[in-house]
Image (tube, grey):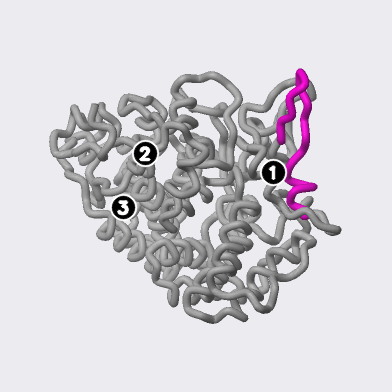
Amino acid sequence: MKLNNKTIISLILINGALLFSSCEKFVDLGAPPTQVITGDAFASDASANSVIRGLYSTVLNINLSGTTTFFTGIAADDLQYNATDAGITEFASNNILNTNNNVANLWYNCYQLIKNTNNAISGLDASNSLTPTIKDQLIGEAKFFRAYAYFYLVNLYGDVPLQLRNDLYAFEDASLPRTDKQQVYDQIVSDLKDAESKMQTNYDATASPRGRANKAAASALLARVYLYQKDYQNAELYATKVLQSSDYGMPAPDKNFQNTSSEVILQLGNLTGVTTFGANYITAATAVPGYTLPDAVYNSFESSSTTDLRKMNWTSLKTISGKNYYAITKYKVASGTGAEYHIILRLAEQYLIRAEARSRLNNLSGARADIDAVRSRAGLTGINNGSNQTQLLTAIETERLHEFFGEYGHRWLDLKRTERANEVLSPVKSNWQPTDVLFPIPQAQILINTKLTQNPGYEN
C-alpha cells in the first residue's frame, strides 16, 4: 500500500494488552509520532532524533522491564507470586505450556523492538543529511537496544532467529530458522562495540536524567555479555571502563532507586515517576502484594551486630491474616506521582561483574576489593582476606542475590549461566526438570514458521 508514493513504517508499538501496567510515556522527550514517512524520518537531526525517542517509548510500552523481571523471578527463587493467574503460576511451578500467552508476548515484544531498531539503523545509515556526531549517537542508541533485546531472547529461549534486515515484512514472512546462540551473542557484541564507539560520554541534557544511552551504557552491557560468555578478561576491562568514571557512585540504599541516584547508568523515565516495580511490589497495608520476597531469601541476609542496609531499606515485613509477607521496597512509590524511573543498568552490577571476572582470573585481592565496595554500601564488613577462589565465587553469588532480587531476571540468568540452576532450584521446585532452564518457543510461532523448532521438554 502506498501513500503519496512513500512507504509508511510504523516505528512505535502501542500494545493494547500490556501485562502489568498501563501505557507509559517517555518523560521530557516529547511525544514521538506513531508513524513517520521514510522519506522524511531521517532527513533532519530533529526528525531522526524523534525516531530514536520512539525506541525508548517502545521499551516502556511493551513493559519489557516487568516481563523480564516477574516471570524470571518466580521461575527462579527470588520472587514469590501471591495471586492465582494461571498464565503466571506456570512460571512459579516451572510447568510452562508452549501456548502460554505471556511467553508469546515476551517473544513478540522483543522482536517488535528489534524490527524498530532495524528500521532505524537502516534509515540512519542511508541518510546523508544528518550531523555526523548526531547520526553516530543515534545509530549507537539503536544498536544498543537491538543488543538488549537479543540478550534477553538468547538467554530465555536459547537459539533464536537473528533478524538484521530492514524489511517491514521480514518478520511477518515467518521464514527464519533458529540461529545458534553463539552467533547471536557475536552480533550482540558487535552491536555494543559499535554503539560504544559511536555514542557520546555525556548524557543528553535535554532528556530525563541519564535517560538516553551513552558510551557507559554500552560498556556496562558489554561487561555483562562478556561475563556470560566467560570472557573474563574483557568482562573486567569493560566493567573497569565504567567504574573508573567519576560520573557514577554508590549512594546509600535508601536513596538508591531515586531518579537522581548517582548509581544509575541508564534508566527509562516516564511522566509519573512511578514504575512497574512499585506498582507490583507495594500495596496498601491490608493488601497482599502480587510479588514478594521468599522467606528463604529474606532469611539469607547476614545476621550479625550489623544489619544489612539492603534488608532494612529494600524489604518490609507485612503480616496479613496471620501470614507474613516480605514486601520488596526498593522502589517506594506505587501510584500517583514520584521520582523513580525504571533503572536498567546500575553501578553495583559492574563491581560484581569485575569481582567475578577477577576471581576467575585469580586476582583474588582485586575481587575482594570489588565485593567489599558493594558490602560497604550495605553497611557490612569486608570479606575475609583469606578467602580462596571458591569462597569468593560463593560470596559473589550471594551478593548478587541480595543486590538484584526482583530486578530484570538477574537471579534466573545467574543460575543458568553458572550451571547451578538444577542444584539450587530442584530442591525447592517440585516439578523442576533440567530442560526448564529455557522457556518454550511460542507454539503459535512454530505453527506459522515451520523452520522453527521447539525447545526440549515443551514438545507437547
Label located before the other in sequence (3 or 2): 3
Dot 2 amino acid type: Gln
270 relative position to 60: left or right: right
At horizontal 55% and vertical 71% (from top left) the residue drawn is 354
Taking depth in this image into account, of 452 and 90 the one nearest to the observer is: 90
Q: Which residue is mark 2?
A: 433
Q: Which residue is mark 3?
A: 123
Q: Which residues are magenta?
A: 308-326
Dot 2, crowdedness within 10 Å: few (<14), some or many (≥20)? some
Element marked by disc 2: loop
Query: Residue 158: horizontal and vertical position, in percent?
Result: 31, 48
Query: Residue 105: horizontal and vertical position, in percent?
Result: 39, 31
- Asked which quadrant contains residue 5, the reply is top left
Dot 1, crowdedness within 10 Å: few (<14), some or many (≥20)? some
Q: Which residue is mark 1?
A: 298
Distance from disc 2 to disc 1, alpha carbons, whole Å, reads 25 Å
Question: Among all residues in the image, which is located at the extreme right?
Answer: 305
Query: In which quadrant of the rendered image does the C terminus lie?
Result: top left
412 relative position to 41: left or right: right
Label located before the other in sequence (3 or 1): 3
Which numbered mark, 2 or 1, is in the foreground of this view? Answer: 2
